[in-house]
Amino acid sequence: MESIVKKYQRQFRKIKDETSRWEELQSRLISQFSNASSIIQRLQEIQNLQNYGTLRFVEGIEGFVLGKQMDSFQTILLSINNTMKEFGGIVSSVEKVVRDSKQLPKVGSAQMNAKQLKQQIGVKPTLADCIEGLRLLEEMHRSEYLLKLSLVSALPALALKPSASGDLEALQQLLVDQPNIPRDEVQYVYDIIFAEEIS
């Protein structure tokens, strides 16, 4: 039993290593999203010739400036997609660790019963704690990834929508709030799993 708990703890360390970049990617995504939002907010102004002053008499100025902004927007969208791929890679790694971990409680060909899964050895976590902790971490990261994906996928549509600033602000605030991964909850899971190292 104790050896299985240690195997679980190794699995948790793998997840911790994988997800340590999550906050760094979050900061990068917020910056990229903010840059994309700034361009979207400028697009409406760019299409109003009155905003060009004397430059409005330069032939094709509106199309030129609009084209440059759209090129920048496309470049930012590509960067956002690359960041999302990195998030997706982390989620896939966490899911693989969880899948692999489901085999650990099997002893030979027999599955451990509920009583064995809840059996405590000293300050070590129970196998049930380990299984539930992994499930929680997987669920939090997958949910957060899907939320981010839905937010960034709204950007191209908002670029074509006049007066999108209110929607953009709401989406950006939602991205900043990061509601699905409370740091203290993640730390609580790790505290339970590595209790004997803390005590």
Image (spheres, helix red, strand yellow):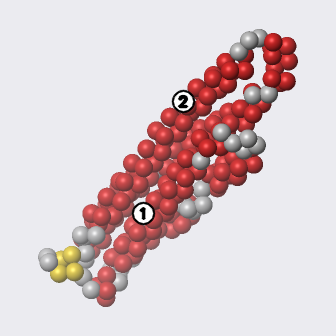
Q: Is residue 87 above or below residue 185?
A: above
Q: Name the image quarter holding residue 120.
A: bottom left
What is the x, y in percent for residue 33?
Answer: 61, 41
What is the x, y in percent for residue 9?
Answer: 34, 64
Q: Which residue is mark 2?
A: 75
Q: Residue furthest left?
A: 108
Q: Name the image quarter holding residue 62.
A: top right
- Which mark is on residue 138? 1
Residue 193 shows in the view: no
Which residue is found at the position 50% from the left and 61% from the top?
Answer: 143
In space, the residues marked 2 and 1 are separated at their CA atoms by 31 Å
Are the two marked residues, 2 and 1, in contact with CB atoms closer than 8 angstroms? no
Q: Is residue 132 above or below residue 178?
A: below
Q: Nearer the viewer, mark 2 or mark 1?
A: 2
Q: Amino acid at mark 2?
A: Thr
Nearer-N-terminus badge (2/1): 2
